[in-house]
Image (spheres, grey):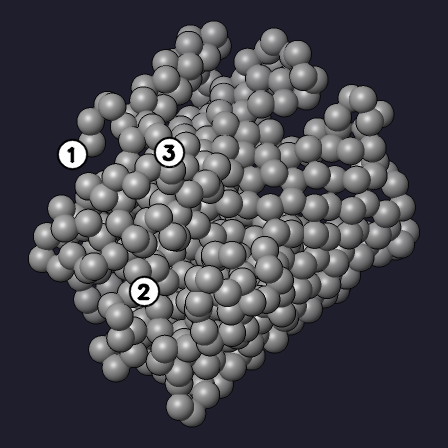
Amino acid sequence: MRTCSKPGCLCTLILFVIASCCLQAQPVRKPTQYVAEAGTYLSSSTETPFWLRANQYGIVPNRSPVATFRAGIYSEYDTSRQSTGRWRDSNFAVGYGINVVVNGTQNGLSYEHNVLLPEAYVKVRRGIWELYVGRRREKFGLADSTLSTGSYAWSGNAMPLPKIQISIPNFTPIGFTKGWVAIQGTFAHGYMDAKGYIQNPMLHQKSLYLRFGHQRDFMRFYAGLNHQAVWGGKASPDNIPGTIQPSGELPSGLLNYFYVVSTLYPKSKDISEYNYFDLTNRVGNHLGSVDIAAEIDLARYTLYVYRQSLYDDGSLFYLINIADGLNGVRIRRNDDNAIVRDILFEFLNTTSQGGPDFILEDAKRRGKDDYFNHQQFRDGWAYRQHTIGTPFIPPALGPKDQYPFGTFTANNRVYVFHTGISGSLPVNGSALAAPISYQIKLSYSRNFGTYNAPFTPVRNQFSGYAGVVVPLSILGGLQLTGSVAVDAGTLYQNSVGTFLSIRKIVNTN
C-alpha cells in the first residue's frame, strides 16, 4: 500500500483540494449529453478481428461472440461562462463525464468481459489551463485522429489510465510572437495496473507541442514530443529477476520522481536502493516520440504530413534508429459532406531499433531497443493486457509466442502499410436525419518478431475494415452502426467479423 510520503499521493491530495475549490466556485451543471448504445460482435472464428477491437480504448473483448451495452453522461463547459482563452482569464468552468460498458460473452473470464468504466472524470477550466482527475479518452502525438493506425506511444488502444493532469489542451498563441507561435502541452501523474507483475507502478507523462504559423496561414508547421515513464512499485515475491533489488522494491519517492521527470541518472550509488540496471538505464521505463508535421491549405483541400520518430533509450539521440517511425499523409477535402473527404496513407517501421546489438559503452551500438518490453517492468508498455501504444505491437499471442525473457510482446519489429478513407453518402429519404458516414481501413503488415526471438518465417498479415453510421430520424433520432472486418494471414486467426449497434444521443444544451 502506498503511503502519503510518495509523490503520487501528495499530488493527488494537492490537486484534489484545488479541484474541490474550483467546484465550489461554480454549481455543478446538469448533464449536457446522454448516450446509450446496445450492440453485438460476431465473428467466424473465436477471435474478434483486429480492426474491430484495435484503438477502441480496451472495451472490445478479443473473443467473440459478444453482446455489449454502453451508457454515458457528460457535462461540457458552460459556454455562457466559458473562459476566453486568455492567460489571465479568471472564470472557472467545470465539466464531467462517466461512461459504463457491460460486455457479455461465452468465452473466457478476462477483465474485459465484465463491467468496465473507461471514462469517469471531473475537469476544470480556467483561462488556457485545464485540470482533470480520473479516466478520460485521449490520444497523444501529431497524427491523424480517426483513420490512423494510432500514434506510436499513446494510440487509444488501451483502457484509459486513472490520471491527474494539468494541461493547455488547445494550441494557444504566445503573445510576444504576435500569435505566430502557439503552445499546447500536458503534465500528468497516473497509476498503472495494481495486479500486474510489478504491483502498483506509477506513470509520469508530459507532452509539449508548438505550432508555427497563424491558424489561417497558408502553411503551418508543428513540432514537439511526448514522454512516458513507468516507475515505482514492487515486484511479485515469487519471481524477482536480477534487474530488480532482492527486496523487489523499485526506486520511488520524491528524489526518484525528480529523476523520472528530468530523465537524469541517479547520482547516489546507494546499492540498497539502486542496482546496476537502475544506474545505467535510468529510473523507470521511458519511451515516447519526437514529432513533426506540416499542414498546407490548398483552398478546396488541406494536406497534412507528419512524422513520429521513436525513442526507447538513447538510440534516437545518436540517430541509430532514425529509420524507425510513423509516417503519414492525409488529404482532406474542405467539405464536411464530401463523398470522399479524407484519404490517408501511413507507413510504420519499427524494425531497426538501432540494430541487433546493445553495447552500453559504444554510442553507435546502443541498439536492440526492444520496443514496449522492459527487463524490470515485465508487463510492458500496456495496461490491463492491452498495448497503450500502437496496436501493431501486440501482446504475446499465446504460449507458443511467449517472449523468452518473460516480458510483454513477442513481436515488436514490424512494417505496416496502411490506407484509410472516409466520407459521406448523400442518400435521400425521410427516414434519414443526415448523410450516412463511412470509414474504410486497409492494413498490411510484415511481422518479424524480436531480435532475441525472430519469427521464422516472417508472418504476413492483412486486416481490413469498413463501417457506416446511419442517422435515423425515428424516435427523435437514432444512430445505426454497422461494421465488417476481416483478418487474413499468419499472425492472427483468419476470420470475418461484424459489429451492429443502435445508439441514442440526447443533447440537452
Disc marking residue 408: 2
Image point (20%, 31%), residue name: 2
Count numbered badges in the picture: 3
Q: Residue at x 35, y 30 (%)?
A: 255
Characterize the local packing of mark 2: few (<14), some (14-19) or many (20 or more) Cα atoms within 10 angstroms: many
Q: Can you tell which of label 2 and label 3 is closer to the viewer?
A: 3
Which label's residue is closer to the chain start, 1 or 2?
1
Amino acid identity at mark 1:
Met
**Disc 2/disc 3 C-alpha distance (Å):** 24 Å
Among all residues in the image, which is located at the extreme left? 238
Residue 151 appears in which quarter of the rendering?
A: bottom right
Of mark 2 and mark 3, the one earlier in the sequence is: 3
The label shown at residue 323 is: none
The reply, left or right, for residue 184 in relation to residue 150 is: right
Residue 111, given in percent of the width and then of the height, sits at 23, 55
- Name the residue beneath numbered marker 1: 1
